[in-house]
């Protein structure tokens, strides 16, 4: 290797010519990826921005004229829009809080030494790998009013007397959808928190133990501060996911009963693909995007902050 | 200390720790049950007869096994159960091609970000990573319009293209990490020996990052397999409906045939679940890299 280095260093080498052509080469190699990303992400992004200022309705061939901020104004005036926003907020806050907290707790549990640890750690991936639709039908079947396992289990344990129509009430339906989401999404939090825990050197705890710190203190002064960046990431990513939640609602409740689980993404879907109101749907989708972009900006910024602390 | 004394001491220590250990194992058991129980119930339901599932009080273990639904999914030639087989084949084609395309295009892009120098590289890279956060719902309306103009609605390529856009950023990020770990001297030497740029990519870099290709590939396949929203909007005929879309119709069309629905669910979940459990190490790498650095 030394000879090669010497050779490279000594020769007038063709390196310069190479450098000049790197821009072109880079472009060629990036072309397939950029074509897809521009075609499916960037162009649609701009196109739906334009659509959001029109009245385009697939059912009305005369529609499609420019109506400026008309769609946005209509959305902000629609009480169902605000109701769906409120439900999205409730859904986001509860799933994000529970999943992050539960994820950190289970990760700390799985960070202990016990028999079969590798097996349990592997098992955690199961809910993540399950297709969203299968997760949906699985819980719909469990929550079923007539033959569902939830009713069966609760009556056999003597907790409830009669079978209940769980998905018939807006509030319980919401709670159960949140529950189904928590089951599916917590594993990601567990895996990320566990990875962070494993990167904490055990010397830190040993030093703390020598200094006479109790376990609880060690958690507060070592574990928690070192987990902070990952907790921050989890909160932001999961909030974005919660804003996008569609599959579960579509499969389990279709937004019902009485719009009780009609959240932002599903509301957009209804207006776009059921009422075929493409202009209005685009405006709604843009509002959602602004929220998501805001969240990811916070995320990027907090990540940079986290890196600064590290270095 | 005599041996007997030592033994007694150890036993006492074990006794002192015992309540803590018991609590630990109880908590672990609880986690396992919480993860397995719902899925296990889906599997049990898929293997039961309707009569056994609809008795009150419910019996949790069926008396007889029912393999009819799996048989019908595998051999059926018409009806909704046969359409599941078509959906399964579509899903395999879509997830498979998305994976292959993302690995190839993603590796080339990752090579650019790892080895080449050009103006605006950092900006392009951040931009690609940022696109992951775009909600599909804002893109789907124009994508729908474009695909229908191109005559690609209800075709497999439409779904492959849509999936790739979301998987590519992750693959690029993952592969770049693996490329960074390969010493540059190797390429320098190969180039001196007369190997071309493409030669070094395909003969040195890619073979040395096989674990990275495996990790990204498995990850890409599972994400593409599980994707539902774009498939729902972009396909309205059996030509391109994925298994997820067919199951979503199943649950409303068949109405009360829970056993068939459960069987379909189990079939659809097997590929990603098996891949994830077998290659869990890769999944963990992918998830951490994607989220922490994304």
Image (cartoon, grey):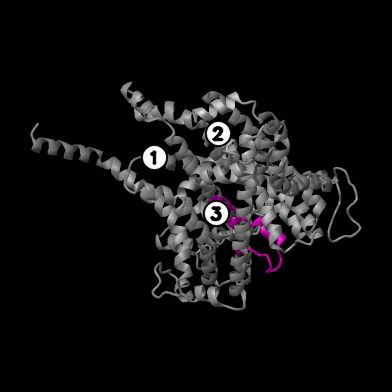
Residue A79, image x and y in percent? Answer: 75, 48
Whether callout 3 and callout 2 share a subunit is answered no
Residue at left 76%, top 53%?
A: B143
Where disc 2 sits, the SS reads helix
> Residue visible at 69% across and 53% down?
B162
Range covered by the magenta-colored residues? B217-243
Q: Nearer the viewer, mark 1 or mark 2?
A: 2
View extreme (top): residue:
A211
Is B206 above or below relative to B157? Answer: above
Q: Residues within 10 Å of mark 2 (few under 14, many from 20)?
A: few
Q: Which residue is mark 3?
A: A176
Label 2 marks a residue whose chain is B
Check disc 2 and report the residue beneath it.
Answer: B184
Asked whether A235 or B230 is in front, the reply is B230
Figure check: B6 above or below B239:
above
Quadrant of residue B161 within the rendered picture? bottom right
Coordinates of residue B102 in the picture (x, y in percent)? 63, 50
């Amino acid at each position: 290797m030394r000879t090669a280095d010497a050779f490279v260093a000594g020769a007038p080498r063709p390196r310069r010519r190479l450098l000049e052509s790197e821009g072109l080469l880079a472009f060629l190699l990036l072309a397939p990826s950029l074509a897809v990303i521009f075609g499916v992400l960037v162009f649609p992004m701009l196109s739906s921005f334009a659509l959001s200022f029109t009245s385009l309705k697939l059912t009305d061939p005369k529609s499609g004229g420019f109506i400026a901020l008309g769609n946005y104004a209509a959305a902000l005036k629609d009480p169902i829009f605000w109701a769906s926003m409120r439900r999205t907020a409730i859904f986001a806050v509860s799933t994000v809080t529970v999943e992050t907290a539960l994820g950190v707790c289970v990760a700390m549990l799985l960070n202990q030494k016990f028999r079969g640890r590798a097996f349990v750690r592997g098992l955690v991936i199961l809910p993540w790998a399950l297709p969203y639709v299968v997760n949906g039908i699985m819980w719909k079947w469990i929550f079923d009013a007539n033959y569902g396992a939830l009713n069966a289990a609760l009556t056999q344990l003597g907790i409830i007397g009669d079978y209940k129509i769980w998905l018939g009430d807006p509030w319980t339906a919401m709670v159960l959808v949140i529950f189904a989401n928590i089951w599916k999404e917590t594993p990601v939090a567990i895996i990320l928190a566990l990875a962070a825990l494993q990167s904490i050197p055990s010397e830190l705890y040993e030093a703390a133990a020598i200094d006479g710190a109790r376990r609880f203190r060690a958690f507060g002064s070592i574990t928690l501060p070192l987990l902070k960046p990952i907790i921050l990431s989890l909160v932001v990513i999961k909030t974005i996911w919660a804003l996008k939640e569609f599959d579960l609602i579509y499969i389990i409740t279709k937004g019902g009963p009485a719009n009780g689980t009609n959240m932002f993404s599903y509301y957009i879907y209804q207006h776009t693909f059921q009422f075929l109101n493409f202009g209005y749907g685009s405006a709604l989708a843009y509002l959602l995007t602004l929220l998501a972009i805001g969240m990811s900006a916070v995320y990027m910024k907090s990540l940079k902050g986290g890196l600064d602390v590290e270095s | 200390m005599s041996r007997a004394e030592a033994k007694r001491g150890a036993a006492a220590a074990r006794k002192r720790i015992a309540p803590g250990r018991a609590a630990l194992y109880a908590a672990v058991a609880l986690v396992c049950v919480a993860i397995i129980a719902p899925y296990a119930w889906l599997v049990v339901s898929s293997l039961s007869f309707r009569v056994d599932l609809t008795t009150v009080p419910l019996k949790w273990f069926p008396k007889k096994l029912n393999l009819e639904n799996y048989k019908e999914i595998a051999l059926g030639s018409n009806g909704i159960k046969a359409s599941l087989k078509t959906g399964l084949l579509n899903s395999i084609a879509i997830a498979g091609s998305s994976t292959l395309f993302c690995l190839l295009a993603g590796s080339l892009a990752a090579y650019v970000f790892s080895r080449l120098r050009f103006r605006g590289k950092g900006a392009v890279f951040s931009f690609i990573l940022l696109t992951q956060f775009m909600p599909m719902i804002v893109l789907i309306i124009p994508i729908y319009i474009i695909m229908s103009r191109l005559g690609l609605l209800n075709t497999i390529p439409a779904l492959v293209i849509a999936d790739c856009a979301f998987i590519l950023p992750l693959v690029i990020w993952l592969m770049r990490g693996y490329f960074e770990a390969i010493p540059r001297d190797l390429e320098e030497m190969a180039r001196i020996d007369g190997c071309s740029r493409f030669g070094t990519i395909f003969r040195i870099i890619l073979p040395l990052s096989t674990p990275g290709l495996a990790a990204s590939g498995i990850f890409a396949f599972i994400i593409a397999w599980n994707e539902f929203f774009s498939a729902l909007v972009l396909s309205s005929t059996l030509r391109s409906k994925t298994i997820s879309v067919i199951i979503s119709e199943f649950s409303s069309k068949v109405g009360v045939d829970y056993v068939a629905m459960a069987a379909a669910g189990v079939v659809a979940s097997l590929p990603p679940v098996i891949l994830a459990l077998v290659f869990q190490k890769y999944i963990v790498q992918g998830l951490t890299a994607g989220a922490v650095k994304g």
